[in-house]
Image (cartoon, rainbow, N blue to C red):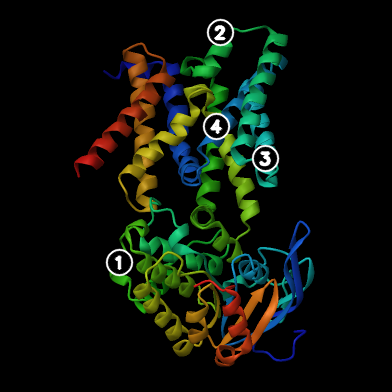
Amino acid sequence: MFDIFSYGFILRGIEVGLIIGAISPLIGIFLVLRRYSLIADTLSHVSLAGVAVGLWLNVNPLLTAIGVSVASSFAIEKLRLSKKVYGESALSIFLSGSLAIALIILSLAHGFSVDLFNYLFGSILTVKQSDVYIILGVGIVVLISVLLLYKELIYITFDEEAARVGGIPTKLINNIFIVLAALTVALAIPIVGILLISALIVIPVVSALQLKKSFWKTLILAEVFSITSVFVGILASFYLNLPAGGAIVLTTLIIFVLTMLYQRMK
Amino acid sequence: MSEITHTNTIIELKDVSFAYEKEAVVKDVSLVVHKGDYLGIIGPNGGGKSTLLKLILGLLTPTKGEVFLFGEKLNKFKDWSKFGYISQVVTHTDPHFPMTVKEVVAMGRYSRLGMLRFPAKKDAEKVQKALEQVEMWEFRDRLIGDLSGGQKQRVFIARALTGEPEIIVLDEPTAGVDVKTQKQFYELLQKLNKELSLTLVLVSHELDVIEKEATEIAYINNSLIYYGAADKFAHSEYFEKLTEKGEHHV
């Protein structure tokens, strides 16, 4: 049964998967409650432009994805706050704009390859040891940052105006937060792929919210759902020969349906 | 150090004006709030009363004039833990937000704690004390969204109290609650004002309630039309005039 752990690539996949599974709800809970779920989607498409740059320049695409998504996150937040366009329009401008840029760069580089498919849908088989170190390092930074800013993030999410009056530097915290979101999205690319990242960030949180608990318990439940989904998804991909990203997101969906049923039966 | 000599001045506005684009919403308003005052800011919708409150709290910057808080210029003022702020709680709170009464009230400690510091036992005690003051301790583990409008108001008062403020500022706190709950809410405010000698500034469109509750009244319709003692306001000709014109909303 445990022969699965004798494969290096699976171990790397599980290591990376668990880190991503742990940090996704930390970002997700604030995104969902602030009605910013779409930001995860936008940042993931922006990351694709970053991946394209990496493939073109022959640099580790994970690094370029991190760079491009963090840089764009500032621009997204600025455009959103400027109120020159509606918030969600700002997001679609970035979403489709970066997709267009990614397409052009990819065709300039070497056209559409298997590589691209891996980035779109994730592929734990191709996770390199260097990726594990990058994801572990940046993942720890995200984790510690969220924990340190936990009470400010809660206050801003619940009542931004009162937080501002209370002297909390809301602008600074919002900027740090969107950078953390951009980092999380970029890190999740190898596991679930660009097209499924927002599902991993959003669905475990939405499932936990169904159970109507305190903030703290909701976050713990979301963590449990997220980490379980990643683990079950990777096992399923190994034994049933399924794509890991799809299996992980399907598991989150099954948990979501179960929480809905549980809530209804109560 | 202080630029103002009488130490019990909490808020001072000097000829403050504010305009969105070119339209002046607040024009040349000057007023002073002293410790222990209960100021009701009233006026018609669109008359600038919420804007005035935002100017006081530094959420907006005046286009002209100056705001002083505790004797300091607003842009130099740092000690925001002296302020408790309650916005339109009943209409603004997300009913599905996963947060217990205790967690909501604990937020009131955050600005006192400062960044990168975590709540300790002392903070939990303050939360309990504040919830007991508003008679909501037994609801501590309930979700905020499951409470009635009046209960939510009490929780938000407790949140403001945990920060041990000197002044509580309220923006239309009774929007969306029934008359009976409203009455209890104003009784609680009286208790805070008289027993804890907390300074209160309240924005409301309920002119007839506020003139009975508050000690001072500022009637603003872009510019300050009446500013002074509440009992004088009731008999003033302003009231008659404004009522006749139908400019106040009940």
Horizontal side, residue A186 vs residue B125: left or right? right
Q: CA distance from mark 2 to mark 1?
A: 57 Å
Secondary structure found at label 4: helix
Q: Is residue B10 visible?
A: no
Q: Given the image, on which type of amino acid does mark 4 rest? A: Val
Q: CA distance from mark 4 to mark 1?
A: 38 Å
Q: Is residue B81 visible?
A: yes
Q: CA distance from mark 3 to mark 4?
A: 24 Å
The chain letter for the residue carrying disc 3 is A
The chain letter for the residue carrying disc 1 is B
Q: Nearer the viewer, mark 2 or mark 1?
A: 1
Q: Given the image, on which type of amino acid does mark 1 rest? A: Phe
Is the residue B108 above or below the residue A137 in the image?
Answer: below
| Residue at far front of view | B244
Check residue B207 in the rendering and tell me which mark sits there, or answer none: none
Check residue A85 in the rendering and tell me which mark sits there, or answer none: 3
Q: Measuring from the top left, give residue B190's x and y in whole percent.
A: 45, 85
Secondary structure found at label 3: loop
The chain letter for the residue carrying disc 4 is A
Check residue B139 in the rendering and tell me which mark sits there, or answer none: 1
Secondary structure found at label 2: helix
* Tag 4 residue: A185
Q: Place residue A100 in its image quadrant.
A: top right
